[in-house]
């Protein structure tokens, strides 16, 4: 009887002993709990990319920066405006003027033509042409016509006096100087023609350079 009471007396002391912690009792559970606090692989990659510093474009490829800056500031040759926005003037067309007049008149010729055309009742215009005749082959032909003359006639105006040139004779007369000469032997209009290469002995006909 003395052994039984001693056993019951030990039970309270055993109950008073502290219980072992759950971590010591279940080591696998504490290991998985520690793994759950670590970031996943995807979260680790994302964090690393966001934390990486951004590199400038010049550090990656300097040639790209130089080509981009030059293309943005250099104007093209085909543009019609400058860098400042001002419009360039359009190029002017070059005017081609004939260096040789169809006919030039001396003051004596102008005075005589003005006297001939001063008739108020019947104004006339002198028309100059060329016909095939004479020893050399060609001769001047002058006649008076009513204005405005033929449809294709060349009009030469000088000092208020107008003269008509037959379109068929223009090639033979162009560049000539018309003069009026009055002497004891004859009176009439004469021509100094740079196109003549040969004349007859009497001076009535001529031949021109083709």
Image (cartoon, rainbow, N blue to C red):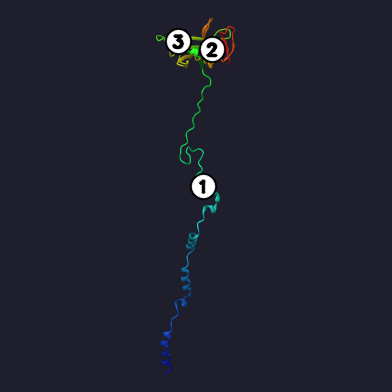
* Label disc, if present, on residue 183 of the rendered structure: none
Q: Viewer-proximal residue, 77 or 16?
A: 77
Depth order, front residue of 7/150: 150
Residue 18, horizontal then vertical, whole percent:
43, 82
> Mark 1 touching mark 2, by CB under 8 A?
no
In this orientation, which residue lies closer to the viewer: 15 or 198? 198
Residue 181 versus residue 87: which sits nearer the camera?
Answer: 181
Mark positioned earlier in the residue sequence (2 or 3)? 3
Residue to which mark 2 is pinned: 191
- The residue labelled by disc 1 is 69
Q: How far apart are marks 1 and 2 (CA)?
A: 72 Å
1 or 2: mark nearer the eye: 2
Tell me the residue that label 3 is attached to.
115
**For numbered disc 2, what is the local secondary structure?**
strand
First in sequence: mark 1 or mark 3?
Answer: 1
- Residue 104 drawn above or below residue 64: above
| Alpha-carbon span between mark 1 and mark 3 | 79 Å
In the rendered image, which quarter is residue 160 located in?
A: top left
Secondary structure beneath disc 1?
A: helix
Q: Which residue is drawn at 41% across and 90% down?
A: 9
Tell me if I can see residue 126 in this picture. Answer: no
- Of the numbered discs 1 and 2, the one sitting upstream in the chain is 1
Q: Which residue lies furthest to the top in this view?
A: 185
Give the x, y percent position of residue 210.
Answer: 58, 16
* Mark 1 vs mark 3: in front: 3
**Mark 2: few, some, or many residues within 10 Å (few <14, many ≥20)?**
some
Mark 1, residues whose alpha carbon is within 10 Å: few (<14), some, or many (≥20)?
few
Residue at the spot x=45%, y=12% of the render? 114
């Amino acid at each position: 009887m003395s052994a039984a009471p001693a056993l019951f007396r030990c039970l309270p002391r055993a109950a008073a002993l502290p219980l072992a912690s759950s971590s010591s009792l279940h080591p696998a559970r504490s290991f998985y709990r520690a793994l759950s606090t670590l970031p996943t692989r995807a979260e680790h990659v994302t964090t690393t990319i966001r934390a990486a510093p951004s590199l400038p474009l010049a550090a990656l490829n300097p040639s790209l920066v130089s080509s981009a800056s030059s293309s943005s500031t250099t104007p093209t040759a085909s543009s019609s405006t400058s860098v400042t926005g001002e419009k360039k003037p359009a190029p002017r067309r070059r005017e081609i003027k004939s260096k040789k007049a169809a006919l030039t008149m001396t003051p004596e010729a102008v005075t005589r033509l003005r006297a001939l055309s001063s008739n108020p009742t019947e104004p006339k215009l002198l028309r100059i042409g060329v016909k095939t005749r004479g020893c050399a082959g060609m001769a001047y032909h002058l006649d008076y016509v009513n204005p405005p003359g033929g449809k294709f006639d060349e009009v030469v105006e000088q000092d208020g006096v107008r003269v008509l040139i037959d379109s068929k004779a223009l090639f033979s007369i162009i560049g000539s100087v018309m003069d009026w000469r009055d002497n004891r032997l004859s009176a009439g209009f004469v021509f100094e023609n740079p196109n003549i290469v040969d004349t007859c002995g009497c001076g009535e006909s001529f031949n021109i350079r083709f």
